[in-house]
Image (cartoon, rainbow, N blue to C red):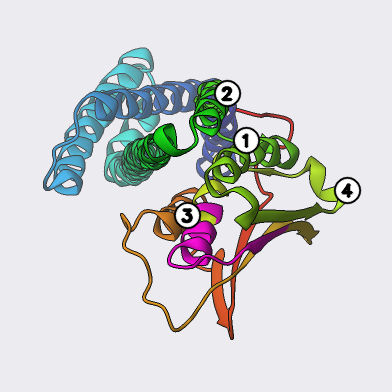
Amino acid sequence: MIGTTYVFTVIQAYLLILWFNISDSIAWTDSVVHTTSLALIGVAICFSLSHYRPAKGRYVFLLIYVAVLTFAWAGCCYWLVNEIFKDVPYYQHWSFFALPVRFITGFLVVTAVGIKTLMWYDMEEQRQELARKEATERLAREAELFKLRQQLQPHFLFNSLNSINALITLRPQQAREMVLKLSDFLRGTLKREDQQWILLPEEMQYLQLYLDIEKVRFGHRLSTDIAAEEKASMLKLPPMLLQPVVENAIKYGLYDTTDAITISISAWQSDEMLCIQVQNPFDPTLQAPAGTGFGLASIQRRLYLLFGRQDLLETNANENIFTTLIKVPQLYDKSSNN
C-alpha cells in the first residue's frame, strides 16, 4: 500500500508539472494531499467491508458508499489545498475545473479497491464454507468408519461365542482353548482401536489369531495357505480389513459341507497399490448360508469412505473357486501409523 501510494504520488506530481506547468512545490503538495488521502479512503473501504457486507445488493451498496466517500474526499482536498495556496489564483482556478476529473478518477480507483475487496471476502467466505463442509463430511465419514469397525467385533464375537457354546459339551478342552485364543484376539483388537493404518505383517498376525480360533472350531477341515511378497511388508492398510473377507470365505466354504478346504491368502505390491487376494472353494449348487450381510459390504463401504473409489474390491466366481481381490492405494503418509 505504501509503495503504491508513493508511485502514484510521483506520477501525479510529474503530470502536474509537465502537462499543466504547475510549480514544483504546488504540484508535490497537491499530489501528496490527494494521493495520501485517497489511499486512506481505500484503507477505510477495506476495513469497513471486513465488518459489514450486506447479504443482498452489496455491489449497489458499494457504489453508493464509494460515491459518498469520493465526494467527501474531493471536496475536503479541494478546500485544503486552496487554503494552503490561497494566494495563487491560477492554481485555484485550475483546481476548480479539475474537480470533476479528480472525482471520476478517485471514484474509479476506490471502486476498483472496493470490488477487489468484496471479491476477496467472497472467496474467503467460500473457502471457509468449503472447509466447514469438508470438515463436516470428514467427521461423518470418520463416524461411519468407526461404526463399521465397532460392528465388526460384535459380529465376530457372537459367532465365536456360539461356537464355544457348541464345543463346551462335546469338546470342553477345545472350548477352553478357544476362549483363551478369543481373549488374545480381543486384546489385540483393543490395541488397534485408535489406529487408522497398520503394516501388512501386523494385519496378517491379527488375522492369524482369528484363524487360530476358527481352526479350533472346525479342526482339520480348515487349513490356510498364506503368502506375501517381501516388499509388500512395508505397505499399510486399514486394520481389521481382511477378517470379514476370510470369515466370508469360511462361511461359504465350510458351511453345509463336511469336506476339508484350504483358504489361500496372498499379498503383493502393484505400482502404488497393496493387493490382497483371498480364494476359497465353494459348492455352487448349495444355497448360500444366511448371514448378517456385513462381510464384503463392509469392506466395500470402508474402502469407498477412505479413498472415494468403488473399484477397490473385486469378486469373481470361477467354477468352484471364489476369489476376492482387495486393492489398497498407498497415498497416505507412510511414516505414520495413526
The residue that mark 1 highlights is: 209
Looking at the rendered structure, the kind of residue marked 4 is Glu
Q: Amino acid at mark 1?
A: Leu
Disc 2 or 4, which lies upstream in sequence? 2
Mark 2 Cα shell of 10 Å, populated few (<14), some (14-19), many (≥20): some
Cα distance between the residues tagged 2 and 4: 27 Å
**Element carrying mark 1:** helix
Q: Residue at x 33, y 58 (%)?
A: 291
Image depth: mark 1 or mark 4 in front: 1
**Res. 109 visible in picture:** no
Q: Position of residue 33 (x, y in %)?
A: 42, 21
Residue 51 is inside the magenta segment: no
Do labels 1 and 3 touch, CB within 8 Å? no
Residue contact between numbered discs 1 and 2, judged by CB atoms under 8 Å:
yes
What number is the disc on residue 31?
none
Disc 1 to disc 3, C-alpha distance = 20 Å
Q: Which mark is residue 299?
A: 3
Name the quadrant containing residue 275. bottom right
- Is there a contact, CB below 8 Å, between mark 1 and mark 4? no
| Type of the residue with mark 2 | Asp
Residues at marks 1 and 4, CA–CA distance in whole angstroms: 21 Å
